[in-house]
Image (spheres, rainbow, N blue to C red):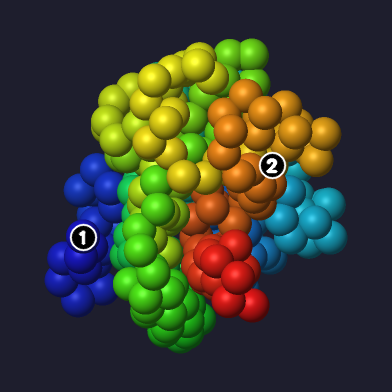
Amino acid sequence: MENKVQENSWADALGQIHRPHDGAARIVSLVPSLTELVCDLGLAGQLVGRTGFCIHPKETLKTVPKVGGTKDVNIARLRELEPTHVIVNIDENRRECVEEIAAFVPHVIVTHPCAPEDNLAVYRLLGGVFDRRDEAGRLEEALRQALEAARAVGEGMPRERVLYLIWREPWMTVARGTYISAALAAVGWDTWPPGAEPRYPAFDLNASWLREVGRVFLSSEPYRFRAGHLAEVELATGKPTSLIDGEMVSWYGSRAVAGMRYLAALRRSLSGLE
């Protein structure tokens, strides 16, 4: 969705209007993938806080204070950092926590990219607010090219139904309404089962709908599936099973550019085209 309201004004995911910040900002990011984006926009020097899950870029973030996790933010510590802006996400951060933060932080920027192309609006929003429009423009162009290439791969092959596993005991997958599902769909992989809710359904490996799946992916996050799990899942499902880089599929922000390229290459590789 286009988020430019008028010249020098941008709306976030809640429709809140944000304008360019005058001078250096004090940014706290509570979203790992957007912490990476903040740094890629050249704003690492204005980043004063992050969560413990914000791990990229590793060397840059070593000196940036942590304020807890995405779901259990240390409000007292965050307050001490005196941020001018806090970046949050509808899926990753608790509403009650965000409302508490908004009571003392001047600008809380709410994000909610649901598909890779939604990152374009996020780039414009952060690039506009923090005077990094040129950097944001370069990311926009790179993502448009990566999306075009990924969709060309998807359109050039038959669509395939896939099971994307994110957890074990219980087994859990992703629904169609998730960013992960949208990213996979760009290269012609349709997540199964096809429902939109719940967003992260649990299921048994003897579920009848598994017969309709053509391939299984074991994600590296949030559960860290490893090579040792491949045989177990392949034996239980009877489907070809592969490991997949969860960050490349589920992280938005600047990582979406590399993520689309990664998925396009993986689709070609598993189809025997490279």
Question: What residue did someone put label 1 on?
Answer: 1
User: Label 2: how many residues lie within 10 Å, few (<14), some (14-19) or many (20+)?
Assistant: some
Specify the quadrant that holds the C terminus. Answer: bottom right
Residue 273 image point, x, y percent: 58, 76
* Labels 1, 2: front one: 2
The residue lying at 20 percent from left, 65 percent from top is 2
Specify the quadrant that holds the N terminus. Answer: bottom left
The residue under label 1 is which amino acid type? Met
Pick the front one: 43 or 150: 150
Residue 153 picture quarter = bottom left
Q: Which mark is drawn over residue 220? A: 2
Residue 251 image point, x, y percent: 54, 52
User: Label 1: how many residues lie within 10 Å, few (<14), some (14-19) or many (20+)?
Assistant: few
The residue under label 2 is which amino acid type? Ser
Pick the front one: 238 or 256: 238
Q: How many marks?
A: 2
Pick the front one: 92 or 200: 200
Residue 135 image point, x, y percent: 50, 81
Separation of disc 1 and disc 2 at Cα?
30 Å
The residue lying at 55 percent from left, 71 percent from top is 268
Mark closest to the chain's N terminus, 1 or 2:
1
Apparent side of residue 71 relative to residue 189 in the rendered image (left or right): right
Residue 195 picture quarter = top left
